[in-house]
Amino acid sequence: MPFLVVTIALAAFVLLLIFFYYVPFFLWINALSAGVRVSLVQLFLMRLRRVPPRTIVYAMIEAHKAGLRTITRDELEAHFLAGGHVEKVVHALVSASKANIDLSFQMATAIDLAGRDVLQAVQMSVNPKVIDTPPVTAVAKDGIQLIAKARVTVRANIKQLVGGAGEETILARVGEGIVSSIGSSESHKSVLENPDSISKLVLKKGLDAGTAFEILSIDIADIDIGKNIGAVLQIDQAQADKNIAQARAEERRSMAVALEQEMKAKAQEARAKVIEAEAQIPIAMAEALRNGNLGVMDYYKMQNIQADTDMRDSIARPTGNSGGGKTDKK
């Protein structure tokens, strides 16, 4: 008999646990005490649809207490089943309502399903965010390189959060604007004297178009002087010109050497012809003597003339001293 009583008690306890799990009675009491009307049947059906009743009920209580009474249970369940964050959406709607920001439930759920943090977006609309740009390198017209850093103050644009570009686009556009502004400056000194001119020029470009943010201000935090790009380019150009000149000089030298070799070859050829012609002279003289066209006296006279010519050549040839071709011996 006691065993039967214990068995019945355990069965009753298990049934109560199952009942209170599928029918969250105390959660229903909590909702009623907060003024949120939801039936036990709906709470039970939430369990069957695998929707956490606590999340939905607490979100409804928060919205009801904040005065957002147009949000229904079905909308919250549908957003949860779609993979959204119900708590963040309700927190964002409450924050937007308190800050007088026009944000509907449909817009908030769309932002959340798009992968953005809707609560953070509302907070950024109230409290703007400061984004530090990476160092941006640009060159002024005088060839001096400048490295600038900027701080961009942005505020979330609720209407552009769905489909709008993110922070990376803002940073890229601001960097492009800084490069354009510095590049159009005549001198790097004017940029260093008036860094606010960069901010004014960049702000006029409307860089926040098509993005999820509204640019409030662009402040130049720091400007450093980099390399003298103009001088570096001139040095490179001079080096290139030097290399070209050396190549052309080497080409001319090679041509001169080739011409010299050609002239030497021609001189040797001419010398060989002279030697050949000189070798023919004795033969011609012998032939002339044999035929009687040249006398003995004529031959001697020719020899004297040749000796006189050789003497004159030896006197005229430089010997490196002033002794008339003779060297002094000590």
Image (spheres, rainbow, N blue to C red):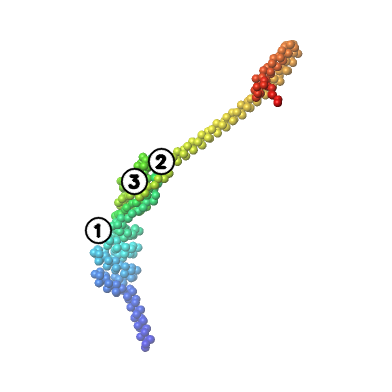
Q: Secondary structure at mark 2?
A: loop
Q: Which mark is residue 185?
A: none
Q: Position of residue 98 (x, y in %)?
A: 25, 61
The residue depicted at 54 percent of the width and 33 percent of the height is 249
Residue 123 drawn above or below residue 195: below
Left or right of 260 on screen, residue 218: left
Q: Nearer the viewer, residue 280 or 105?
A: 280
Which residue, given by chain and number where applicable, does mark 1 sit on? 100
Q: Secondary structure at mark 3?
A: loop
The residue beneath circle 3 is: 195
The numbered mark, 2 or 3, whose residue comes first in the sequence reads 2
- The answer to which of marks 1 and 3 sits earlier in the sequence is 1
Is 99 or 191 nearer to us in this picture?
191
Q: CA distance from mark 1 to mark 3?
A: 36 Å
Residue lying furthest right: 290
Q: Callout 2: few (<14), some (14-19), or many (20+) C-alpha neighbours within 10 Å? A: some
Q: Identity of the amino acid at label 1?
A: Asn
Q: Are marks 1 and 3 in contact (CB under 8 Å)?
A: no
Q: Amino acid at mark 2?
A: Gly
**Given the image, on which type of amino acid does mark 3 rest?**
Pro
**Label of residue 143 in the image:** 2
Side (left or right) of 233 relative to 288:
left
Q: CA distance from mark 1 to mark 2?
A: 51 Å
- Camera-nearest label, 1 or 3: 3
Q: Residue furthest bottom?
A: 1
The answer to which of 177 and 237 lies nearer the viewer is 237
